[in-house]
Amino acid sequence: MIPRETIDRIFSAARIEDVVSDYVSLKKRGANLIGLCPFHDEKTGSFTVSPSKGIFKCFGCGKAGHSVGFVMEIEQCSYVDALRQLAKKYHIEIEERELTAEEKQKQDDRESMFVVNEFANKWFHEQLWNTPEGTAVAMSYLRQRGLREDIIRKFQIGYSPEKAALWDAAKKKGFQEKYLLNDSQNAPYIGTGVCGKSENGKLYDRFRGRVMFPFFSISGKVVGFSGRLMVKNDKVGKYVNSPTSLIYEKHNELFGLYQAKQAISKNNSCYLVEGQMDVIQLVQSGIENVVASGGTALTINQIRLIHRFTENIVLLYDGDKAGIKAALRGIDMMLEEGINIRVILLPEGEDPDSFAKSRNASDLKEFLETNQHDFIRFKTQLLMEEAQNDPTRRSEMILQIVRSIAVIPDIIKRQVYIKDTATLLSMPEDVLTRKVAEIRKQAADDRQKRKETEQRQQTQSQETSKEDTQTIVATAPVAQPLTHKERNILNLIQVLIRYGEKVLYQTEDQMITVGEYIITEINNDSIDIPNPLYKLVIDEYVANYQTPQFVASVFFQHHPNEAISQLAVDMIADKYQLSRMYSKRSISENVVQEVQQDETNVLPELVQRLLLELKYTVVDERIDSMQRLLKEAQERGDWQLITAILEQQPQLMEIRTQLCRALGNRVIVR
C-alpha cells in the first residue's frame, strides 16, 4: 500500500485545475472554471472545476471526482497508476503496493506497450541523428522538404533503417516479443506492432526504410507511429501506421494535438488538415494551432478531441476536387457537436505543405485570416455549381444543405443559417424553416425509439443478471431512487463527510465531534444502515477519526476505495441546501441567507434536525409495519399477536408525536 502521508502529498500537490487543464480547455466563471466535458458528448460546457474544493463535476453526465479520479477516468487507469502518474508530474517519490496477479497483468500489458513505444521512439530518433544512414538518407530528405532542426526535434521525427535493427535492439533490452508484435487474434489487441513476423516465422521491423512520425496522447505518451517512404514505390503504400492495439486506434488520434493544445486553447481556434507534413510545415511557419486527421475520414472521436480545447475549427484543404470532397466530409458531424466551421480552399495545385513553404510567415497568416469562408456559403455555392440547371439535382443539393442546417443544436445559429441560405438560393425562408423542423422532428423521434429500445434491453439484462452482493459499486447514490429512510441517512452521511471532525459540543471533560454524535445517536436507537456503502463510511470514520490532523472531507475524498471517494466528491460537490429545512414561518430570511453562505454556523441545529427526521421516519415505518401485522393477525384471528401489537402501538404513537413536536411546523425532508 502507498502510505497515507504520500497520498496526501500527491493530492496536495496535484491541484485540480492544473491536472484538468492538461486535457480540457477551461474558462473562468466566478470562483470556478468551466469547460466541455471530456467524458460525454456535449455542445455547451457543463463541466465545472472547483479549485477551492479540489474537485470536478459534470452537471451533464454526472461524473465527479478529485484530481486522481480525473486521471483514472481520462487515462483509463487504476487508482495506483493515477497516483504514480501524478507523483511523477510533481516529482514525488512513492512506495508502490504489491499488486494482485490480475492487476499486475492488466497494468503490465498497457504500461509495457507505452514503454516499448517510448523506447522505439528514442531509437528512431537516435537513428536519424546519430547514424550514417540516418543523416545521409532521412535527414537529407527532411532538409529537402524544408524542415528546420528545431521542428524535427519538436515533433520527435525519427528514422527506421532499411536493415532490421530495432528488433535486435529491443531484444537486447529485454522486451517481450508479445509487446513488440501485435496479436490481432485477441481484442483488445496486445502489442505495439513496431515489429512483425512473416509466415515463415522470420522477424522484421514494420517501419524499415521510413521516416517516422510519432503520435502522442494528450498527456504526451507515445501511442503509435506513422512511417513515410522517402521515394515513390508503387508496390507498397506511402504510409505504414501502427496497428490497432490496446493503446492506439488510428481513427481516434490527431497528429500534432499534443504539441498544439495550448495554442488551440490560446487562439480559441484549430486548423484541421489531412497530413503530418501539412501540420509540421504550418507550425514551422508560425501557425501552431493545427492538427491532422491522418488522411482518413474525420471521426466523431477526433472532433470531440478538438472540441475539448475550442469550438472553432477551420478546414484547410487542397483546392482540387479531392480537397473539396475532404472538406465536405464530417461537416455534419462537426455541426452536430456544436462546432463553428469555416473553410479555406488553397489555390489549385497547392496543399498546406507546399503553400506554407512558398510564403513567409506574415503572408501565410494574412492569407489564412482573410480567406476563410463560412461553411454554409461554401457548401451552398459548391453544390449549386454542381447541380447547375438540373431541377432534380438542384432539389437534392438543397436537401443536403437543409440537412446540414438541421443538425445545428443552437436555435439562433440555425435560424441565421436558414435566413442566409434562403437568400443564397432565392427561396422563401419559411419553406426552409418547415423542412428543417421536419428533419429535426424525425431525428428526435428516431432517438426516442432507440432510447426506448436500449432501456428495454437494459431492463431485460438487469433482470437476468446476478449481482455480487459482496461488491460495493462506485456509483453516486443520489442518482438512484431512495426511500425516505435512505434519504435521511444520506443527509447525515453528507454532514459527516463534510464536517465530521468539527466539534459539535464541548464539556469540561471532552469534546464531541459531529461524526461521533451522529454515530452515537444512530447506535443508541439501534437504527440499521441498509446501504453497505453508507455503513462502510461510518465504519471508516470510527476507525480513523482519532488520527492526528484528521479532516473528514480530505480523508474520504482521498480514500483508496473508489466507491467511498466518489461518494465524498458527490457530497461535497452537491452542497446540501439548509434553507430547504426551514419554512418562512420558523426562520427569518436573513438567517436563511446566512445558512446558505456558511453551514458551519448552524451545525448543532442542522445535526439535531437531520437526526430527528431520521428517527421520525424510522418510527413512522415501524408504525406502518405494525399496522400491516395487525391487519394480518386480525385476518388469521391471532389474538395473542393482536394483543401484543395493541400494547406496543400507543408507545410508538407517543414517540412519533414527541418527534413531530420537536420538529415543529418545519417541512420534513423526504
Image (tube, rainbow, N blue to C red):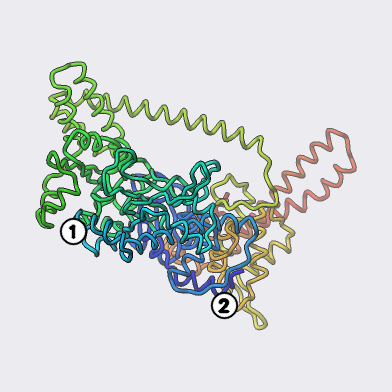
In this view, 102 is above or below 15: above
Q: Looking at the image, can residue 57 be seen?
A: yes
* Depth check, front residue: 598 or 555: 555
* Depth check, front residue: 215 or 640: 215
Residue type, label 1: Gly
Return the residue at label 2: 549
Q: Looking at the image, can residue 575 be seen?
A: no
Residue type, label 2: Gln
Alpha-carbon neighbours of circle 1 within 10 Å: few (<14), some, or many (≥20)?
some
Label located before the other in sequence (1 or 2)? 1
Q: Which residue is drawn at 32% across and 51% down?
A: 255
* Depth check, front residue: 94 or 407: 94
Residue 582: percent from the left, percent from the top? 51, 57
In this view, 70 is above or below 382: below
Dot 2 lies on which element?
loop
* Depth check, front residue: 562 or 627: 562
Q: Residue at x 53, y 43 (%)?
A: 187
Return the residue at label 1: 286
Counting the numbered discs, the total is 2
Q: Which residue is drawn at 39% across and 53% down?
A: 47
Alpha-carbon neighbours of circle 2 within 10 Å: few (<14), some, or many (≥20)?
few
Residue 288: percent from the left, percent from the top? 23, 57
Dot 1 lies on which element?
loop
* Figure quadrant of the N terminus: bottom right
Residue 18: percent from the left, percent from the top? 38, 65
In this view, 90 is above or below 378: below
Label 1 – label 2 distance at C-alpha = 52 Å
Q: Residue furthest right?
A: 640
Residue 448, quarter of the rendered image: top left
Residue 229: percent from the left, percent from the top? 30, 48
